[in-house]
Image: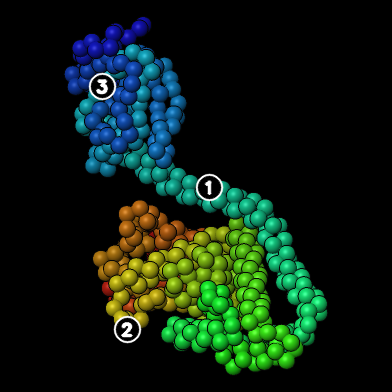
Amino acid sequence: MSAPPAGTAPRAASPRELRSLFLFEHLDEQQLARFAAAGTVEHVAPGWLYREGAPARSFFVLLDGAVSLHRRVGGDDVEIGRTRQRGVYAGAWEAYLGEGAPGVYTSSLRVLEPASVFALPAAEFGAAVREWFPMAVHLLEGLRLGITEAQELVSARERLLALGSLTAGLTHELGNPAAALSRTVVQLQAQVDALASGLLRLVPGGDALAAGLARARAAAAPPAGDVLARADAEDALLERLEDAGVAEPDAGDLAAVLADAGVGEEDLDAFAGAAGAGGVPARGALPWLARSLAVESLLGEAAAASARISSLLASAGRYAQLDRAPTRWVDVRELLDDSVAMLGAGAGRAPGGARIVRDYAEDVPQVLGHAGELAQVWTNLLDNALDALAGAGATAPPGAGRDPGTVVLRVRADDGGRAVVVEVDDDGPGVPPEVLPRVFEPFVTTKDVGEGTGLGLDIAWRVVVQRHRGTLSVTSVPGRTVFRARLPVDPDQTDQPDQSDQSAPPDQTVPGGSAP
């Protein structure tokens, strides 16, 4: 049967027509009559019947024609499937949840050719289902919530696994050129030194220049960071260079190089004297000294940067492969270090300037656990602490002790070596009192819209409490927030922890003890 021309006026549906649809075939006559009176048969032209995000006003059942279902991924509408199956339904089908139903369409439906649909108001459809099938509604609601929660966890797990696979591949591919770069820089340093030594042997006074360079290297003391003192040193060196006959603009550039290297006026005078004794004019020897020190400095920076790249790639490789084994004995201090490195704070400073302090006890036993999941916990807690400090740093008054802020990572044994306690302690502004009691609930976040999902602490709670049979709590007052995780060394030998012993004033400490 072909659909009437698009634009035909809607008409009433008959109970007999509805019974021919598999969705309604087991309803009684009274129920069919109620739906027939509430809904209409509409004839629609090709195009969008409804769009994802629009108010969910109707429940649709296909009578004739062809349609396709779409979901929005990023900025694109991705087709999920298409059908000509009579009786398929779409639209506000979750209206039976009442107030818990989505208020908007969660997908888009496109009509591919002139079609007929039975349109039922969402409110009428939901009310009828709740009235006729109350037990089924409860079962469906529980099933929906369970599936949604499982999908979120599985989706997060799949994304982590995909990211881990991608990271492992990238670190493998980047590791070889990074190692080659490190070796090349080291070899380049040696070759530059050899080249300089060879050239010095070819010029008169070369031995004096080499000895003067060695003394300048030994005497150099890089400036401690005082901007005014460095400017004064540069001005003094510029005068010495001009007195030696070095012309501008080279003199200005060379003075800056020498000041950065920590060469003082006395060092410069001593080098000029040694070069003159060897027959080399100061106006030629001093630029050579500055350029030599500049090349050494640049090579040193390149060597440090290439070593840093190799170290980060090694950390990323370990981080990405933590899930290869379901459980293993792990040192939580190593996982913390890898998390710090992954957040760009391996040198003790985070990108925003916050200071990272490690306070690790020596007698910390290894823990039997899921290494990848624990690393995710530490990353989430540390990332939250750094975000809190970044937000506080812009507004903290002078002397508040929060600019740029400090995060202390503590690890110690507990309960006679049968457990390990990890603390992430920051001196940020603290968790707002109205948020603190719900901080471990899903979708609760203090970050700005678009910057946080509110799932990080929920995931951390599930990993620590549910997966590793530990405890997770937070203590927060203005100026200090401490997240404390306690992990049994062997979860299989530990009873489920009693969260009641984590009691504290409700405005200060919140135990992650009740399932979100």
- Local crowd size for mark 1, using a 10 Å CA cut-off: few (<14), some (14–19), many (≥20): few
Residue 175, how many percent across, how many down? 68, 58
Q: How many marks?
A: 3
Q: Give amino acid for label 2.
A: Gly
Of residue 429 and residue 373, the one placed in the foreground of this image is 429
Q: Which of marks 2 and 1 is in front?
A: 2
Secondary structure of the residue carrying tag 1 is helix
Task: Give me the disc on residue 119.
Answer: 3
**Alpha-carbon span between mark 3 and mark 2:** 66 Å
Q: Mark 1 and mark 3 in contact (Cβ < 8 Å)? A: no
Q: Residue at x 46, y 63 (%)?
A: 380
Figure quadrant of residue 200: bottom right
| Res 29 visible | no
Closest to the camera, between mark 3 and mark 2, is 2
Find disc 2 in the rendering and name its residue.
Answer: 399
What x and y, as percent, mark residue 45? Answer: 30, 16
Q: Sequence-wise, which precedes: disc 2 or disc 1?
A: 1
Question: Label 3 is placed on what type of residue?
Answer: Ala
Query: Which SS class for mark 2?
Result: loop
Q: Name the residue under label 1.
A: 158
Three-letter residue code for mark 1: Glu
Label 3 or label 2, whichever comes before in sequence order: 3
